[in-house]
Amino acid sequence: MAYSDKVIDHYNNPRNVGQLDKGSAEVGTGLVGAPECGDVMRLQIRVNPETQVIEEAKFKTFGCGSAIASSSLATEWIKGRTVEDALAIKNTDIVKELSLPPVKIHCSVLAEDAIRAAIGDWKKKNGVAEAEPAAVTAQ
Amino acid sequence: MLKVLDSAVPVACWSCSVAHNESILFCPHCSKIQPPPGGDYFSVFGLAPRLDLDLGMLEHEFHRLSRKLHPDRFARALPNEKDWSLADTALLNDAYRTLRDPIRRTGYLLKLQGAEMGEEHSGKDRKDPSRVPADLLEEVFELNMQLEEMRMARKMGQTDPDLQADLTAAKKKFDGLLDAVDQDLRGQWKVWDEGDEAARQSAQKTMVALLDRRRYLSNLVRDVTETLGA
């Protein structure tokens, strides 16, 4: 199976590889896996608490080229969006952009799951922070 | 592709017209070769689905049937019989390759059972994002990070003997984790083979989770072995 040029580009030059401080209240972490192929993907976002805009996104994926490209593209797309806007990204958008073949669609699903998990984690943290503002300022 | 054996439906032999179980390669009445049967891989060997198989017997049956199906034996047979000897041989080979491997056999049986459980189950399964437990993901991610660090160090040309030792230790660790999964799987085989319907259901769930874990671990073993060999 041949990878599309866009997959190869993201695979060779992955965008936003790295790690954010998991302990920070502004950071949401999503860790997801595809048991079908043994891939594991971590996607993190840093959200501006005033604007709800995702200012930074980082990922680290252990998996095939399509999984790496899907998560790399996902971080590019969510950066600069508000949290709610980022939730609008669908795996089918990733499939289209990267021309993923049917057998690799689960890689795009994984990337969408990772976005949702990271935002979910941030929301959970944020909910706690809103209830106890003193705890946040104490950090 | 996976069909569940329905042995309640007899098929008439094309040659002698005597009805026989559809999963049989040769008519029990007139001994003529039959078209590829529609049952599962177990039924090719006359077995009911089970996980703890006598591999010696399986191999013996495989050789016996292979000889009986050999296309040379059908040199003077009808064109249909010649075709069937090839098709039955292909089916027998697929069945043997799948059943003799413990992991493939387990996966195959679970798929067979999944097909029986119907749409409700598979639909729920697909939508379940928590199928991979969080602690497994954490563990696998962490192991991958450690392995990558060692691989990077090696790529940079470090010939640190500690690094080699770390990699060897990592391989030993992954191998051990994989062995533990295989032992757990064997334990579940017994539960499935000997249990009632409720026990089988719970064993199936456990085995699906174990195979998921196994896939992650075997990727790690593959990667660490590659790094050690490079």
Image (spheres, coloured by chain):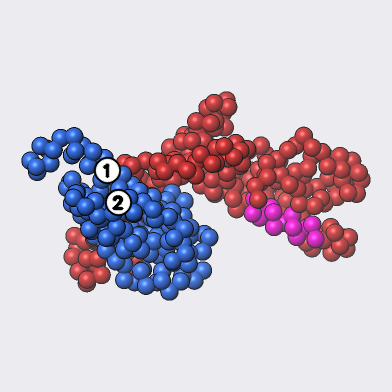
Q: Position of residue B174 (x, y in %)?
A: 34, 50
Residue at horizontal 43%, vertical 66%? A97
- Magenta: predominant secondary structure element? helix
Tell me the SS state at disc 2.
helix
Q: Residue tagged by mark 2?
A: A83
Residue at horizontal 76%, vertical 52%? B36
- Say which amino acid is labelled 2: Val
Q: How many badges with numbers are in the image?
A: 2
Instruction: Tell me if residue B107 can be seen.
Output: yes
Of all residues, the one furthest to the front in this rendering is A51
Q: Position of residue B186 (x, y in %)?
A: 48, 38
Say whether residue A138 is left or right of residue A129.
Answer: left
Subunit of label 2: A
Residue at horizontal 25%, vertical 70%? B155
Span colored in magenta: B83-95
Say whether residue B53 is left or right of residue A120.
Answer: right
Chain B hue?
red
Q: Residue tagged by mark 1?
A: A123
